[in-house]
Image: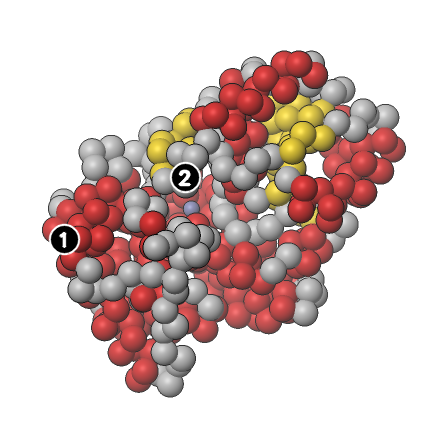
């Protein structure tokens, strides 16, 4: 069971970043893209100055690729920084964790969105420069600090919170599968009951609060439901996936990144396709599948192929996804039964008609097709 050293969340928390950063080092390097820095740079600068720390910000260039990570290591060394602080989304966070580790300094995260469970973990997902999944990198430590300002998260587009709910719902489905098979988790051993229980708690908190929280964030309001969903997306799901285990849903997500049609979608949107497909692979009770499709539709998550730019009759693309999802070492092999590429392709092809039918019978909106901007 592994976890970050300290987790801080609340309205206005970003104004305390300097106080917490000072416990970690004297020369912080903030890594943030220009958009994020425009929103929070002023508060962070004031907070670092108040704590007597220098203000040094390096721009993040968008994709956590091996090249961008090596560039950040160079900046850390040149500036003599002793703690790297990611301010932004999952990509910035993954790049800074990897760079902090390679430069042998401490690292901390200040997520400005609750769109993934990346902030708390001791691993990074590395992508190619064109955005395909490349590898997981594992580190000997989790971040020393994760600090989330709930108002900053509520000010961000609601689609990011929704994507985070998709990522966090998968946590329980995957931890449940990993616990049934007693497979290894991302933390390196078989699951503790603690890791599995936190994954389940994340699921329960989301079913209770996600719809209310999404509505509140549409108006940029922080309510108790919003605080709970931010915590479920960031902390519970982070601890739950890492120490509870990943299985089919994330492997299928990784497979989806192998085709250009899905590029431009958020991580959690693609993960939700993985969750629905995992339920099909498990032969889950039809009432479980129906409830999941209805709930995720109400939250605003995709659960059909057409919503992620794919078609059930495009066997060639589905085969590429299924092959990538089942390569040796993928977390799909933590399922309590063997899963072949053919199984994944069939399950994926089945979800279009299945989910659309469930939605129609429930009087929910029909799927709206997605077309990737960079897909020709
Ligand atoms: Zn994820």
Split into 4 quadrants, where in the image is the N terminus?
A: top left
Residue that mark 2 sits on: 130
Q: Quickly name the residue at label 1.
A: 343
What's the residue at 30%, 44% (across, down)? 258
Q: Position of residue 298 (x, y in %)?
A: 45, 73
Which quadrant of the figure has residue 17? top right
Secondary element at image label 1: helix
Q: Which of the two residues, 6 or 162, is positioned nearer the viewer here?
A: 162
The correct choice, above or below, for 295 with respect to 29 in the image is below
Where is residue 166? Give x, y as percent: 43, 57
The answer to whether the residues at label 1 and label 2 have Cβ atoms under 8 Å apart is no
The Cα–Cα distance between marks 1 and 2, rounded to whole angstroms, is 28 Å
Mark 1 or 2: the one toward you? 2
Residue pictured at 41% horizontal, 28% vertical: 137
Mark 1, other Cα within 10 Å: few <14 / some 14–19 / many ≥20:
some
The reply to whether residue 308 is visible in this rendering is: yes
Residue 29 location in percent, x, y?
69, 26
For the point 39% across and 64% down, the residue is 370
Residue density around tag 2, few if under 14, some if 14–19, many if 20 or more, within 10 Å:
few
Which of 252 and 174 lies nearest the eye of the viewer? 252
Q: Tell me the quarter of the picture where residue 55 sits.
A: top right
The answer to whether the residue bearing label 2 lies less than 8 angstroms from the nearest atom of ligand 1 is: no
Instruction: In the rendered view, tell whether residue 138 sits above or below residue 247.
Output: above
- Name the spot of residue 353 as percent of width and height, x first: 23, 73
Looking at the image, can residue 292 be seen? Answer: no
Figure check: 112 above or below 185 = below
Q: Earlier in the sequence, mark 1 or mark 2?
A: 2
Q: Quadrant of the C terminus?
A: bottom left
* Number of numbered discs on residues: 2
């Amino acid at each position: 069971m592994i976890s970050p050293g300290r987790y801080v969340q609340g309205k206005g928390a970003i104004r305390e970043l300097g106080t917490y950063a000072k416990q970690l080092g004297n020369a912080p390097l903030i890594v943030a893209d220009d958009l994020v820095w425009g929103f929070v740079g002023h508060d962070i600068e004031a907070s670092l100055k108040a704590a007597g720390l220098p203000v040094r910000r390096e721009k993040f260039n968008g994709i956590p690729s091996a090249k961008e990570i090596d560039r950040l290591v160079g900046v850390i060394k040149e500036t003599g920084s002793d703690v790297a602080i990611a301010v932004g989304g999952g990509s910035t966070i993954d790049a800074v964790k990897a760079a902090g580790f390679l430069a042998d300094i401490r690292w901390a995260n200040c997520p400005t969105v609750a769109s993934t469970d990346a902030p708390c973990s001791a691993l990074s997902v590395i992508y190619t420069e064109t955005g395909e999944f490349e590898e997981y990198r594992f580190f000997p430590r989790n971040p020393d600090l994760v600090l989330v300002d709930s108002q900053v998260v509520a000010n961000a587009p609601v689609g990011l919170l929704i994507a985070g709910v998709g990522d966090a719902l998968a946590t329980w489905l995957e931890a449940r599968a990993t616990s049934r098979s007693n497979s290894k988790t991302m933390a390196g051993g078989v699951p503790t009951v603690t890791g599995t229980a936190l994954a389940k708690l994340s699921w329960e908190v989301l079913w209770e609060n996600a719809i209310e929280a999404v509505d509140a964030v549409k108006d940029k309001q922080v309510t108790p439901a919003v605080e709970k969903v931010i915590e479920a997306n960031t902390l519970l799901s982070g601890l739950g996936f890492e120490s509870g285990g990943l299985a089919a849903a994330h492997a299928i997500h990784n497979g989806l990144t192998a085709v250009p049609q899905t590029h431009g979608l958020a991580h959690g949107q693609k993960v939700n396709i993985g969750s629905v497909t995992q339920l099909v692979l498990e032969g889950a009770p039809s009432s479980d599948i129906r409830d999941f499709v209805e709930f995720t539709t109400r939250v605003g998550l995709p659960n059909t192929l057409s919503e992620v730019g794919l078609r059930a009759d495009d066997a060639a693309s589905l085969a590429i996804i299924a092959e990538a999802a089942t390569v040796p070492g993928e977390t799909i092999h933590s399922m309590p039964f063997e899963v072949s590429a053919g199984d994944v392709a069939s399950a994926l092809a089945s979800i279009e008609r299945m989910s659309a039918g469930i939605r129609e019978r429930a009087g929910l909106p029909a799927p709206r097709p997605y077309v990737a901007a960079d897909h020709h």
